Amino acid sequence: MKTLAVALLITALAALPAAAAAPPRPGTPAPTFKLKTVDGKPLALEQYKGKPVYLDFFASWCAPCRDETPGIIKLSKQYAKKGLVVIGLDDQEISDRATGFRDDFKIKFPVGIADQKTLDSYGVIALPVHVFIDRKGIIKTYRLGEMSYEEIETAIKSIV
């Protein structure tokens, strides 16, 4: 009996990290965050209250992230007039790498470095991760993995 109790406790504890990284579900409020941009400026989701927001979690070493970036830049410009805010969130790389990625692609939207709390609250266990948040702060679409240009545009249209 004691062995069974210990086994159950170990199993329950092993599940905790997975629970901490559970992704938010569409229809739920977007988790808030307070970070810094790669330039050291404050970056908080709250700054964009009332605007449609697209969070793009990436890393400089992530091939699918690099493939998607030119399309994301194009769509960010195309839908800016409808209020779309795109925020790039680097997965804990050193600032030089995130800055290099931004500069290589000539990204004009804010780029921040996500801390572990933010990564966990958005269920980032692999890259890329795409989160589309409507004007009310509700997650409309959550996607782990690469998206085509058309899929990203469709998700953007659902929030603008």
Image: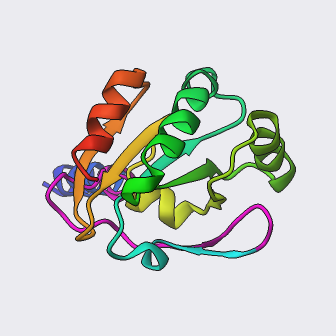
Quadrant that contains the N terminus: bottom left
On screen, residue 160 above or below 106: below
Depth check, front residue: 22 or 42: 42
Image quadrant in which you'd find residue 39: bottom right
Magenta-span inclusion, residue 34: yes
Is residue 65 visible to us here?
no
On screen, residue 24 above or below 29: above
Specify the color scheme. Answer: rainbow
Image quadrant in which you'd find residue 66: top right
Is residue 33 visible to us here?
yes
User: Would you say 44 lies left or right of 130 here?
Assistant: right
User: Would you say 64 lies left or right of 21 here?
Assistant: right
Secondary structure mostly seen in magenta is loop
> What's the residue at 87%, 50% (across, down)?
96
Residue 12, horizontal then vertical, whole percent: 25, 55
Magenta-span inclusion, residue 73: no
The magenta-colored residue range is 15-40
Residue 53, horizontal then vertical, whole percent: 39, 58
Depth check, front residue: 151 or 98: 151
> What's the residue at 58%, 53% (across, down)?
89
> What's the residue at 59%, 31% (across, down)?
69
User: Would you say 63 lies left or right of 125 here?
Assistant: right
Depth check, front residue: 74 or 68: 74
Residue 67, horizontal then vertical, whole percent: 59, 21
> What's the residue at 60%, 63% (across, down)?
115
Residue 93, horizontal then vertical, whole percent: 74, 48
The number of numbered discs placed on residues in the rendered structure image is 0
